[in-house]
Image (spheres, rainbow, N blue to C red):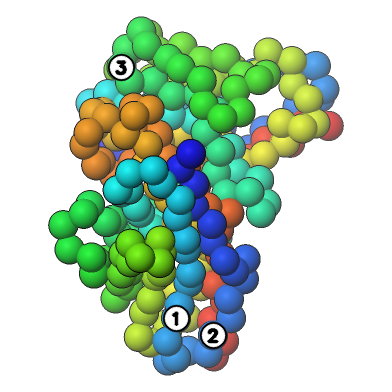
């Protein structure tokens, strides 16, 4: 299994540009999520999905869109990049279930800089 | 609201000495808690998890944590630090009523001196 994969590893954007961060997992996990990591703030949840066709907002959803057309893929879209979105982005997946304690598996991260 | 607070942003120890990384939680019900580790430029790896079974939880690489309800704490310890333990550590609480979302503490950076 490749686990959770993310592309690209690094990206530099200009303010106002759009792009999509890709995330895929091959573990047949129902639950997928996107986090951003900023110094001194831990990881903050952007959006999550409990299964194909179902998405919901996390703590910091503004400026980001997601969709979940398949179990494997969970792309994160920046519609109009802003310098405040400079961060490291992590995708994670796990077996779903609100009453189950499931380890989330994290991808290696995408380091995004917005100029 | 559920939250976690890591009491130290940076901890420095000498190789071979004990490690203590402190975490306090706030929860309106009995929480489930994790510790994750992140090595430089890497993703996050689960160290251990508390699931209300045993209050003393053993994890990978010799780490363990004790859940203390009276103190609302879940501190991470290791008897003897190794150079490879240098990393950032996150205390995390899971929100069952929100589809299993994770709430992260701010992180503690552990440095290990030779």
Which label was assigned to residue B19? 1
Element at badge 1?
strand
Q: Horizontal placement of A71 versus B104: left or right? A: left
The residue located at (72%, 36%) in the rendering is: A86
Q: Residues within 10 Å of mark 2 (few under 14, many from 20)?
A: some
The residue located at (21%, 54%) in the rendering is: B52
Q: Horizontal placement of A91 versus B110: left or right? A: left
Q: Nearer the viewer, residue A72 or B9?
A: B9
The residue located at (54%, 57%) in the rendering is: B5
Q: Nearer the viewer, residue A104 or A115?
A: A104
Which label was assigned to residue A51? 3
Specify which label sits upstream in the sequence, 2 or 1.
Answer: 2
Q: CA distance from mark 2 to mark 1?
A: 7 Å
Q: Are marks 2 and 1 in contact (CB under 8 Å)?
A: yes
Same chain, marks 1 and 3?
no
Q: Position of residue B19 (x, y in %)?
A: 44, 81
Would residue B61 be visible to someone looking at this image? Answer: no
Image quadrant in which the C terminus of chain B is located: bottom right
Same chain, marks 2 and 1?
yes
Q: Which residue is mark 2?
A: B13
Q: Residues within 10 Å of mark 3 (few under 14, many from 20)?
A: some
């Amino acid at each position: 299994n490749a686990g959770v994969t993310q592309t690209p590893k690094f990206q530099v954007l200009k303010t106002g540009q759009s792009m999509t961060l890709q995330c895929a997992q091959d573990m047949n996990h129902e639950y997928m999520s996107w986090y951003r990591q900023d110094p001194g703030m831990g990881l903050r949840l952007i959006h999550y999905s409990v299964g194909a066709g179902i998405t919901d907002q996390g703590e910091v959803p503004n400026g980001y869109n997601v969709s979940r057309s398949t179990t494997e893929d969970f792309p994160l879209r920046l519609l109009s990049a802003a310098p405040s979105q400079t961060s490291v982005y992590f995708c994670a997946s796990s077996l779903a279930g609100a009453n189950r304690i499931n380890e989330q598996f994290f991808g290696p991260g995408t380091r995004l800089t917005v100029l | 609201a559920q939250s976690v607070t890591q009491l130290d942003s940076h901890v420095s120890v000498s190789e071979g000495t004990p490690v203590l990384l402190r975490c306090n939680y706030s929860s309106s019900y009995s929480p489930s808690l994790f510790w994750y580790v992140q090595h430089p430029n890497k993703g996050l790896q689960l160290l251990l998890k508390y699931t209300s079974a045993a209050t003393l939880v053993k994890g990978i690489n010799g780490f363990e944590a004790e859940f203390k309800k009276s103190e609302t704490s879940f501190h991470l310890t290791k008897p003897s630090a190794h150079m490879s333990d240098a990393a950032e550590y996150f205390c995390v609480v899971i929100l069952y009523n929100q589809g299993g979302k994770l709430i992260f503490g701010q992180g503690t950076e552990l440095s290990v001196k030779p």
